[in-house]
Image (spheres, rainbow, N blue to C red):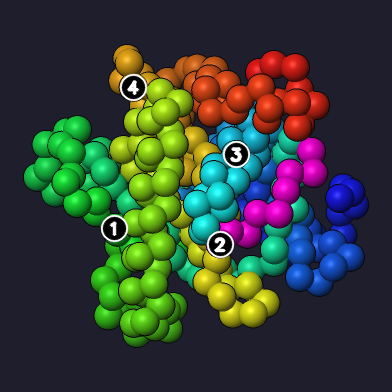
Amino acid sequence: MSLKLGKLIYTGKAKDVYETENPDRVIVKFRDDITAGDGEKKDILQLKGYYNSLISSKLFEVLEAAGIKTQYIGLLEPGYMLAHKLEMISLEVITRNIAAGSLLRRFPFEERQVFEKPIIQMDYKSDEYKDPMLNDDIAMALGLITAEELNDLREITLKINKTLKDFLETKGIILPDFKIEFGYDCEKNIVLGDEISPDTCRYWDIETWDVLDKDLFRQGDSGVMDAYKKVASMVLDDEDLKKWGLNEI
Ligand code: TMP
Ligand code: ASP
């Protein structure tokens, strides 16, 4: 696998997607840009893309090992992921195990209330419309997805939640909530894409309950990169470091 970037085909707020010589494969570049509030707050954090790509790769590998189809093929080098090309669905699929974030601003839940049954929320991915929350009928009327696909998505998402939650717990991390995105591969299968990183999840230290994710940036606190680096060091083991030619994190 070599790092030869073709044409830039998509640029988002934190990642770029490049063509490769194989029309069904792309290279995803994890950038150092960080944004919040639908892009209103912005910064560049050195090495954020590097650490996010390592964390994301590890979590995609954990999911693949559990039998979940993902876009991930391999990390070419830190920051650059080789992936199956997907036609993305404009949905942000959010799973919540513990009440936090916007849920507390919108509904009368207790802070840190644990949900016996995980909550799956779907938002319309659109900066223009500020990612509004959807219901099934709106998602279908917008032509984003069919009723059958929605059922499949929920089932896959619950499996992803259980797999990630159990794995992260063994690494000393609580997973209160996270956002994932799906797309269609060239055979029209629904496949997990995008990234699973501290930009897109809440991670809390199991011992101290310290926040180890993008909430630090959203709240304007310092130590964002220290937290991301800590997540990478907690999630990756010696084997992973050897694989990427790293001695330590
Ligand atoms: P929220 O509590 O702000 O709605 O966030 C729920 C989860 O979704 C949290 O883990 C962070 C993630 N998320 C994104 O990945 N992108 C976004 O644009 C937002 C608002 C949240
Ligand atoms: N992803 C959103 C943005 O980039 C907001 C967020 O994650 O808080 O602006």
Residue appearing at x 47%, y 44% in the figure: 200
- Where is residue 164, by image quadrant? top left
User: Is 212 contained in the magenta span?
Assistant: no
Measured as percent of width and height from the top left, residue 180 is found at 46, 54
User: Which residue carries the number 4 mark?
Assistant: 206
Q: Are marks 4 and 2 in contact (CB under 8 Å)?
A: no
Query: Tag 3: residue type?
Result: Lys
User: Which residue carries the number 3 mark?
Assistant: 58
The Cα–Cα distance between marks 2 and 3, rounded to whole angstroms, is 14 Å
Query: Tag 2: residue type?
Result: Lys
Label 2 environment density (alpha carbons within 10 Å; few <14, some 14–19, many ≥20): some
Measured as percent of width and height from the top left, residue 70 is found at 58, 59
Earlier in the chain: of badge 4 and badge 1, it is 1
Q: Is residue 18 visible?
A: yes
Mark toward the viewer: 1 or 3: 3
Residue 201, placed above or below residue 174: below
Measured as percent of width and height from the top left, residue 170 is found at 42, 28
Label 1 environment density (alpha carbons within 10 Å; few <14, some 14–19, many ≥20): some
The Cα–Cα distance between marks 2 and 1, rounded to whole angstroms, is 19 Å
Question: Which numbered disc covers residue 120?
Answer: 1
Q: Main secondary structure of the magenta part?
A: strand
Residue appearing at x 38%, y 30% in the figure: 169
Earlier in the chain: of badge 4 and badge 2, it is 2
Q: Is mark 4 within 8 Å of ligand 1?
A: no
Label 4 environment density (alpha carbons within 10 Å; few <14, some 14–19, many ≥20): some
Q: Are marks 1 and 3 in contact (CB under 8 Å)?
A: no
Mark toward the viewer: 4 or 2: 2
Residue appearing at x 63%, y 59% in the figure: 71
